[in-house]
Every structure is written in C-alpha cells, then in structure tokens.
Image (tube, grey):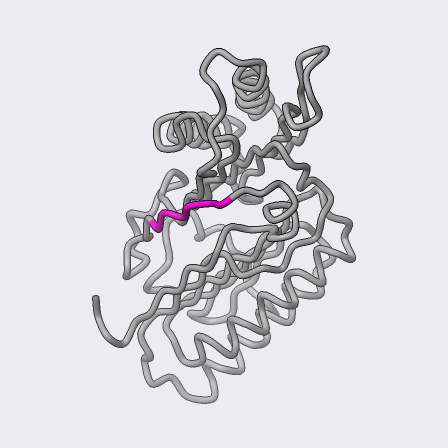
Amino acid sequence: MDPSMHAKLLPFPNFSSIISSGLTLMIFLLLLSTNHSNSSAPESFVYLGCSQLKYNPNSPYQSSVDSVLASLVNSASFTSYNSLNNSIPGSATNEVVYGLFQCRGDLISPGDCHDCVADAVSRLGTLCVGASGGALQYDGCYVRYDNVSFLGVEDKTVVYSKCGPSTGYGSDFLTRRDGILDYIAGSGNYFGVGGSGNVLGYAQCTQDLSISECQDCVSEAIQRLKSQCRLGAWGDIFLGNCYVRCLERGYTSDNSKRLRPVN
C-alpha cells in the first residue's frame, strides 16, 4: 500500500448493544479501490462485520433472520429505506431479529437500490453464515441485522476511515472542501451533496435517526474528516449511523456525477 495513504478500521458499530448482548464481532475490511476510480459501482465493498455468536441451524432465530432479510430485499423495490423486526410467536426475547437497509440518496432508480440490497443480503448470507448479527456497507447501500435493537439509537463510533494521498493542495482546495462540508452539515436532510470546482462531497444518515441526531452525527464525521484527511485527495469517514465522503473530481465514481455545485 502507498505509504501516503492510510485506512483505519475500528470495532463494529454500537458498542453499547454489543456489550449488553455479550457479542464479540469480527470485522473484515474489504477496501474500495485505493484511487476511487471511475469503475466504482453501487455494489463496491466498504466494510463488513459478522457476529461471532452463532445461531443454531433450523432454529426459530434462523427463520426470523431469513424473514427479515427477505422483507428488506422485497421492500427495496419501492423504497430507499426500511427498518423492521421479526420474531416467531413464543420465541425468547433474544430471538427477535432487527433489520435495516438504506440506499444512497442519489440512486434514483428503484432497480439500482433493489439490486444493491439483494446483492448485500446475498453476500451477508455467504460471508456471515450462521452469524446472529451482521452489517455490510456497499458504496450504494447499507444492510444490517442483529438480535439487539440498534434502531433509533444514535451511534457515532468510527467504524471505518480512509484518506487519500496528500496532493499538496493549497488554500483554495481547503476553502472549497470546507465550504462543501459546511453546506452538507447544514442541509437538514438525511442525504446531502455538494460540489465546488473540482471538489465534491456527500453525506448520509440512516433514517431511523431524527434530523437533529442526523446533523449531530454528520457534524462529527465532518470534523473527523477535516482533522484526519487534511490535504488528502479524498477522505471517507463512516460512523455507526452516518458517513461523509469528500473527494477531488478526478478520483470520483460515475455514481457521484449527480452532485450539484455550491454557488
């Protein structure tokens, strides 16, 4: 790896629920292309987490997991976000399964969202076999399930961070970057985008948060990006409930060309 670049991965989101449930989670880092090239697709990996706690095959909990994940895929055909829970009648409290998916705000086509979620669920089934909880972040969507409710719980734990190489940009780059990030922070939406000159940025929260919690989460991510990535050509900061990405146009993906300029 180029020594001018760095990636940082910290433990799985929502420590409080993990500790209370006694789960130990294993994280796998599946890096995006290190140059953020134009080949990036909605199904490009960012990170994956799987619980080390396993459920028994053919158990009520497995039935609940299958039901929740199938429902998430089905609902992705007509909405860009959904959260739900499921349990088999008579099952124990720890056999309730909570699930959530969210697609990136600029994935205009419902088909793109559905395909991204379907692929994520399929990968979770392959890479987190028998795990009681798992989360997968793609470039275009996010899917998570667990036996401890994480819905509506603000979580600003850093899950994944990565910065591009320092390009030696001067004050103009910093002014444009900071202006975009400040614009996004104050957008008051679950998904915010902005661009100025060659600098592009976007941020998103999971919609189980309130708008005020979303702004709080995004503001935290932005401050971390400014301090950690400094003059990097691009930077990614993913917290438990939100993320922010900022990049120089030459490094962006085709999916980010919808970003609108900041006047």
Picture mark count:
0
Q: Quadrant for residue 21, please give it.
A: top right
Residue at 37% across, 58% down: 252
153 with respect to 120 (left or right): right
Asked if 167 appears above or below 114 in the picture, the reply is: below
The C terminus lies in quadrant? bottom right
> What is the span of residues highlighted in magenta in the rendered image?
24-29
In the displayed structure, 52 sits above or below 54; it is: below
Question: Is residue 87 shown to the viewer in this render?
Answer: yes
Residue 189 higher or lower than 117, as above or below: below
- Magenta stretch holds residue 25: yes
Q: Quadrant of the N terminus?
A: bottom left
Q: Main secondary structure of the magenta part?
A: strand
The residue shown at (47%, 45%) is 25
List x then y, in percent, for residue 116: 44, 32
Image x and y of residue 70, in percent: 53, 18
Q: Is residue 212 left or right of residue 76?
A: right
Residue farthest to the front? 22
In the displayed structure, would residue 51 be above or below residue 65? Answer: below
Q: Residue furthest bottom?
A: 171
Asked whether 201 falls inside the magenta stretch, the response is no
The reply to whether residue 204 is in sight is no
Q: Residue at x 50, y 26 (%)?
A: 114
Residue 76: give x, y in percent of width and height.
Answer: 56, 26
Quadrant for residue 20, please give it: top right
**How far from the left and from the top, in percent, is residue 223?**
59, 74
